[in-house]
Amino acid sequence: MLLRVVHITESITASAGGTSTAFVELIEALRTQSASGLELRAISQTLPPDDAARKWIAGHEPNLWHFTGPRGRHLAGTLASDARRLIDEFKPHILHLHGLWCQDLVSVARHALGRGIATCYHPHGMLVHAALRRSVLKKAIFRRMGLAGVLAKADAVVFATDGERVTSDLSMFSHDVQTSVIPLAVNVEIPENARPALAEAGRARLGLAADEPALVFMGRLHPVKRVELTIDAFAKARQSVPGLKLILVGDGDASYVESLRVRAAALGVGLLDAITFAGWLSGDAKWQALAAADALIINSEFENFCYALVEALIVQTPVIMTDNLAMAPAAQNAGAGFMATSDPDALAAAITRLLAISTDRASMGARGRAWVEASFSRPAVGAALVRLYQSISKEPVAP
């Protein structure tokens, strides 16, 4: 049967990663399902004028993407009015919303519900209890301004991992809302044999000698990523692994970044010199940095899905993860890395243990890449989403 779906998110920003990347990759996953009678539209705030973001939509059919003016701050803005117009013209069976805390999304959901259109939510980690504890007042206001009402009438909510599902607050949804665990899609664009060349180029770019042990962190430099914990564990690991280097790939508020430098300097003589603040990297530079490291370290306060983890495994770099992360148990079970508790000593022990098994690190990386290819391919994710849409679609709308 014909199935028309509209996807909406606040905005697409290549440098933001996270929800923007997930949104685009899910659209790409659904584009593999055209044979199933699926028709798609996607709308967001105006695309920023950067090459990485524009590359995302290059070559797509002209009617797929719709970009509009800014979303509103406290009330719905241009994004909502243009999305309502798109819904009335396209007459979708499903409205798939990405994110929660945005009055434009509330307005569009209310509009769709009034027309008998099924609504599906991708919270992207925003309902995880740890995330809800941040900006509590803002979120309480959103609930009162209509969010709770539209979520109570939602037909489905999609989580990227089972860990996200079990740690999320579903109290705003009705008791019979359909919940699904469907991984986010990834594009495994790097050839399997590319690691040696990428690693060599990355070490040259980052000033690492061929035999220097190195860790890489990739993500926003933000308190929620607990970069302080990364630095503390790194400082302890260096006591067992002389010459160990840490590459911080990402950017953040200048005052926070400076606080990280101060922390490192206070932890020991020469520690700050062993840390490279590489800034935000994309394209070849990102892949080279990931491949240049012996391991990726991820110890955020929460991650519903971690693209940095997946991308490290694509270039066969094993991972060290804190056990609070939704993907950590599955990654460890796949043989792709080690978990540890959120404690500097435990993390340092995991770092030391992984760096000591040089002959097996390549096998861990290979197992990790195989896990990614099997679990997160675009066709598999797209097919799962289509099955979900078919299960919640209301009476078919006439073409």
Image (cartoon, rainbow, N blue to C red):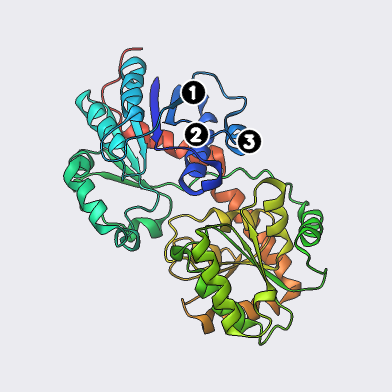
Residue drawn at x 55%, y 58% as measured from the top left: 219
Amino acid under label 2?
Ile
- Is residue 50 positioned above or below 253 on the image? above
Query: Closer to the observer: label 2 or label 3?
Result: 3
Q: CA distance from mark 1 to mark 3?
A: 19 Å
Amino acid under label 3?
Asp
Mark 3: few, some, or many residues within 10 Å (few <14, many ≥20)? Answer: few
Mark 2: few, some, or many residues within 10 Å (few <14, many ≥20)? Answer: many
- Is residue 296 positioned above or below 242 on the image? above
Q: Position of residue 134 (x, y in %)?
A: 32, 60
Residue, disc 2: 27
Say which quarter of the image contains residue 326.
bottom left
Residue, disc 3: 51
Q: Earlier in the sequence, mark 2 or mark 3?
A: 2
* Residue 11 in view (yes/no): yes
Circle 3: element type: helix
Q: Position of residue 92 (x, y in %)?
A: 34, 22
Mark 1 near mark 2, Cβ–Cβ under 8 Å? Answer: yes
Residue drawn at x 36%, y 34% as measured from the top left: 71
Q: Position of residue 392 (x, y in %)?
A: 30, 33
Q: Earlier in the sequence, mark 1 or mark 3?
A: 3
